[in-house]
């Protein structure tokens, strides 16, 4: 039987544990540098304001189940806006801090959400970045990237057949400037909060959703145009009309 000590993931957890003697040692000085990649935005698409959804929360939670079969039917841009805003939208500003609909360590929000559009009314197919400050989508690439996405996700066809697939990226310096190596843990925790919000919102809209963790990292980074070091894809979420 293999030893846990041979696994990098296990080693990372051990080396980023807090105790009263080592807590300062894993919190290095501020990591200087840009916290954002530079993108060439070809179009800015403003999304409608999020709308109220009147569905009992207990019903939404009890019905939630991963969906891997979709029909090629378009969803409304209003539904897309609701899902993105409930997942990572900005709810309020206090002082210099913007607070979103998902919790984040230190209110640093180290994630970005990219959206591969396939079947959304009024929107062209392509790769977009969600601009939470304006509740808008920034088009990065125009076209159908379903085949590239499926290939990058080990042939899982549903990631290219729904209405859209959200690709969640980690921008490491946003967290590590404050929390050092421990901050990497918080990034993945944040991603879970955001994706769960989006899944439950999709369910409240009677849409199917399935999170994805199996993919070829660099192939997905290449689709978006990420370097894979300062910023890298860590999670996906496919959403569409249930088949």
Image (cartoon, rainbow, N blue to C red):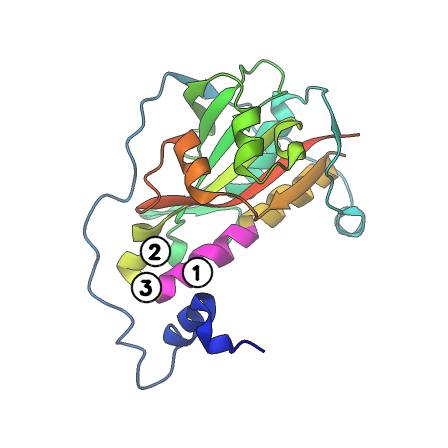
Q: Which stretch did the figure color magenta?
A: 182-193
Q: Which residue does the image show at 58% across and 78% down from the upper left?
A: 1
State how far apart marks 3 and 1 are (Cα).
9 Å
Task: Determine the secondary structure under disc 3.
Answer: helix
Q: Marks 3 and 1: CB-CB under 8 Å?
A: yes
Sort mark 2 into few (<14), some (14-19) or many (20+) by Cα contacts within 10 Å. many
- Can residue 104 be seen here? no
Q: Marks 1 and 2: CB-CB under 8 Å?
A: yes
- Above or below for 66 versus 48: below
- Above or below for 41 versus 184: above
Q: Marks 3 and 2: CB-CB under 8 Å?
A: yes
Image location (x, y in percent) of residue 4 = 51, 76
Question: Between 82 and 121, which is closer to the camera in this rendering?
Answer: 121
Q: Among all residues in the image, which is located at the extreme bottom? A: 21
Label number found at residue 175:
2
Image location (x, y in percent) of residue 31 = 21, 56
Instruction: State the residue position of label 1.
Output: 186
Q: Which residue does the image show at 80% across and 47% down from the upper left?
A: 63
Q: Taking 219 as reference, is 172 left or right?
A: left
Task: Determine the secondary structure under disc 1.
Answer: helix
Q: Which residue does the image show at 44% across and 60% down from the upper left?
A: 186
Residue 192 part of the magenta-drawn span = yes
Sort mark 3 into few (<14), some (14-19) or many (20+) by Cα contacts within 10 Å. many
Task: Determine the secondary structure under disc 2.
Answer: helix
Instruction: State the residue position of label 3.
Output: 179
Image location (x, y in percent) of residue 121 = 63, 16
Question: Between 198 and 219, which is closer to the camera in this rendering?
Answer: 219
Q: Which residue does the image show at 55% across and 53% down from the upper left?
A: 192
State how far apart marks 3 and 2 are (Cα).
6 Å
- Can residue 42 be seen here? yes
Labels 3 and 1: the sequence-earlier one: 3
């Amino acid at each position: 039987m293999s030893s846990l000590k041979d696994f990098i993931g296990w080693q990372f957890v051990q080396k980023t544990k807090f105790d009263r003697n080592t807590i300062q040692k894993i919190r290095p000085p501020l990591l200087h540098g840009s916290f954002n990649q530079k993108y060439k935005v070809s179009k800015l698409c403003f999304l409608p304001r999020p709308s109220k959804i009147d569905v009992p929360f207990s019903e939404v939670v009890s019905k939630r189940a991963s969906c891997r079969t979709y029909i090629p039917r378009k969803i409304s841009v209003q539904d897309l806006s609701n899902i993105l805003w409930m997942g990572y939208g900005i709810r309020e500003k206090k002082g210099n801090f913007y607070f979103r609909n998902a919790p984040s360590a230190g209110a640093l929000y180290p994630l970005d959400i990219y959206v591969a559009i396939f079947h959304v009314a009024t929107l062209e197919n392509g790769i977009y970045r969600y601009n939470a400050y304006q509740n808008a989508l920034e088009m990065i690439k125009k076209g159908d990237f379903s085949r590239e996405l499926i290939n990058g996700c080990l042939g899982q066809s549903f990631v290219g057949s729904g209405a859209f697939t959200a690709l969640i990226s980690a921008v490491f310096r946003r967290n590590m400037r404050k929390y050092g190596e421990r901050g990497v843990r918080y990034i993945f925790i944040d991603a879970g909060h955001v994706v769960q919000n989006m899944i439950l919102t999709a369910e409240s809209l009677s849409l199917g959703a399935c999170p994805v963790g199996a993919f070829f990292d660099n192939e997905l980074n290449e689709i978006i145009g990420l370097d894979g070091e300062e910023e890298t894809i860590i999670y996906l979420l496919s959403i569409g009309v249930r088949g």
